[in-house]
Image (spheres, rainbow, N blue to C red):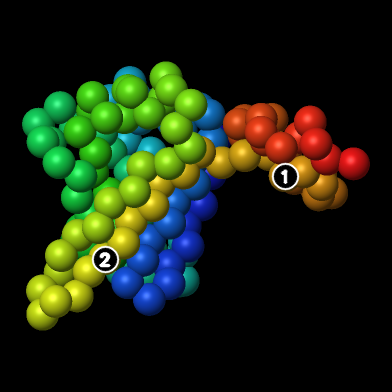
């Protein structure tokens, strides 16, 4: 199940990925999710992250109704295997403006929420200190 979470805020993109999504990314598979605003394909926003063997740097782009963040596959593999929580980069978008991109491992909540399955999320590093 794909659950990539997306947060957009003035010139910033934040995506959170579950453990299976991070593993898929490291294996060279793209992970993506969609939000439908209507039945037509033009009314569906798709967003995701891909690890590319050809990519030498991180990138983010908007193509039609698709938001795509690209990472070098080597970076995705290192991130998946390591303790780093996030990959962050800034893209110059012209006229002195920047787009800030943050890709994070999605941690389980400290206070479980009814109706949410968090089995595929990363263990919260603060779980030991929760009361």
Q: Quadrant of the N terminus?
A: top right
Q: Would you place residue 70 above or below residue 67 in this image?
A: above
* Local crowd size for mark 1, using a 10 Å CA cut-off: few (<14), some (14–19), many (≥20): some
Location of residue 32 (image quadrant):
top left
* Local crowd size for mark 2, using a 10 Å CA cut-off: few (<14), some (14–19), many (≥20): some
Residue 51 drawn at (x, y percent): 25, 33
Q: Residue at x 67, y 35 (%)?
A: 124
Residue 111 drawn at (x, y percent): 82, 47
Q: Would you place residue 106 above or below residue 78 in this image?
A: below
Q: Would you place residue 14 above or below residue 39 in this image?
A: above
Q: Is mark 1 on a helix, strand or loop?
A: loop
Residue 116 drawn at (x, y percent): 75, 45
Q: What element carries label 2?
A: strand
Which residue has dot 2 on it?
99
Which residue has dot 1 on it?
109
Q: Residue at x 38, y 39 (%)?
A: 31
Of the numbered discs 1 and 2, the one sitting upstream in the chain is 2
């Amino acid at each position: 199940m794909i659950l990539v979470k997306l947060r957009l805020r003035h010139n910033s993109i934040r995506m959170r990925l579950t453990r299976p999504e991070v593993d898929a990314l490291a294996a060279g598979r793209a992970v993506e999710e969609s939000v439908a605003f209507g039945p037509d394909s033009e009314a569906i926003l798709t967003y995701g992250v891909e690890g590319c063997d050809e990519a030498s740097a991180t990138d983010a782009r908007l193509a039609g109704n698709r938001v795509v963040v690209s990472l070098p596959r080597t970076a995705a593999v290192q991130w998946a295997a390591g303790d780093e929580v996030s990959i962050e980069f800034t893209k110059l978008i012209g006229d002195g403006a920047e787009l800030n991109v943050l890709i994070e491992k999605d941690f389980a909540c400290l206070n479980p929420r009814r109706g949410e399955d968090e089995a595929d999320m990363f263990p919260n590093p603060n779980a030991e200190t929760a009361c």
